[in-house]
Image (cartoon, helix red, strand yellow):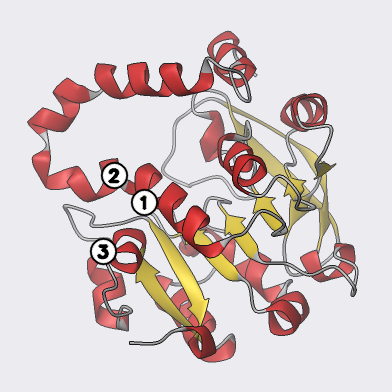
Amino acid sequence: MSTFLRFKASLIRTPLQKPATLFAEFLRLPHRLRHPELKGLFEEPHFLELAIRKLNSTDSNCIDIGCHIGSVLSVFVKIAPKGNHIAFEPVPDKAAFLMKKFPDVQVHQVALSDEAGEAEFHEDLSRSGYSSLAKFKDSNAPSVKYRVKVSKLDDIIPAEHNVNFIKIDVEGAEILVLKGAVRTIDRCRPAIVFENGQIGPEKFGFTHADLFRFVTQTLNYHVFKLRDFIEDQPPLSEEAFHACRIYPFQAQNFLALPVERYQK
């Protein structure tokens, strides 16, 4: 990890985490004022935490896939302190950091996909959060590549382990993670937050339509913008889901709920 990222990570789960977050938001204020049309994206972290609070109890079990430095994992631990949480992070130094920072969480140094084995992983050296199993072809950012272990979520989660909430942020490989988690999802029917940004599933040979249809048709889930869910708005149609990717980018993280849990 870079020096700055190590410093940022060191604040996780300390009394300084919240003040540091507020200070970072203050520093971004000029950018937000210049781009009021991107308000929906700027507010996503706030609505993500609200959704996690609304959908979990103190003993909920959560899974963080693409854990990075543990920002969302720290929310899981805070909101569900009695839960048995599991995190996945393939970057070695991040995984080692997470194991020390979250000794009460089961951390796996592995990338999740739809098959087990090994794969080439591309670590973005300038924007670590953009690291992925496939490098974006138009990116000129400096990176290093190395082999990582790859597993299916279904091969790791015990049959007796209930899962209440899953967050997936794997830079375009979300559909592969979901394909490797069908058994767990069918058994537990958890709430799922997944990313669908501009650098998306095309890197892996899929389209954004493939992702939406897999979630809504194969898994039988509804898809919401985070703010829409909090404000009791209806789920997205496929057309509305695609519209979120058109400037000014209404959302890049989405909440999926089993159809049987959604009531108008």
Marks 3 and 1, Cα distance to the nearest angstrom?
16 Å
- Residue mark closest to the camera, 3 vs 2: 2
- Secondary structure type for disc 3: loop
Q: Which residue is mark 1?
A: 47
Q: Position of residue 245 (x, y in %)?
A: 27, 61
Pointers 3 and 2 in contact (C-beta within 8 Å): no
Quadrant in the picture for residue 241: bottom left
Marks 1 and 2, Cα distance to the nearest angstrom?
6 Å
Relative to 50, is 98 on the left or the right? right
**Circle nearer the N terminus (3, 1):** 1
Relative to 114, is 68 on the left or the right? left
Q: Which residue is mark 3?
A: 244
Q: Position of residue 122 (x, y in %)?
A: 64, 39
User: Which is nearer the eye, 200 or 255?
Assistant: 255
User: Which is nearer the eye, 220 or 104?
Assistant: 104
What amino acid type should be assigned to the residue bearing mark 2? Glu
User: Which is nearer the eye, 164 or 242?
Assistant: 164
Is 43 situated above or below 262? Answer: above
Q: Residue at x 25, y 23 (%)?
A: 28
Q: Residue at x 89, y 75 (%)?
A: 159
Q: Residues within 10 Å of mark 1 (few under 14, many from 20)?
A: some
Q: Which residue is mark 2?
A: 43
Pointers 1 and 2 in contact (C-beta within 8 Å): yes
Marks 3 and 2, Cα distance to the nearest angstrom?
14 Å
**Circle nearer the N terminus (3, 2):** 2
Q: Residue at x 75, y 25 (%)?
A: 101
Q: Position of residue 91 (x, y in %)?
A: 73, 34
Q: Is residue 108 visible?
A: no
Pointers 3 and 1 in contact (C-beta within 8 Å): no
What amino acid type should be assigned to the residue bearing mark 3? Cys
Is 257 situated above or below 80? Answer: below
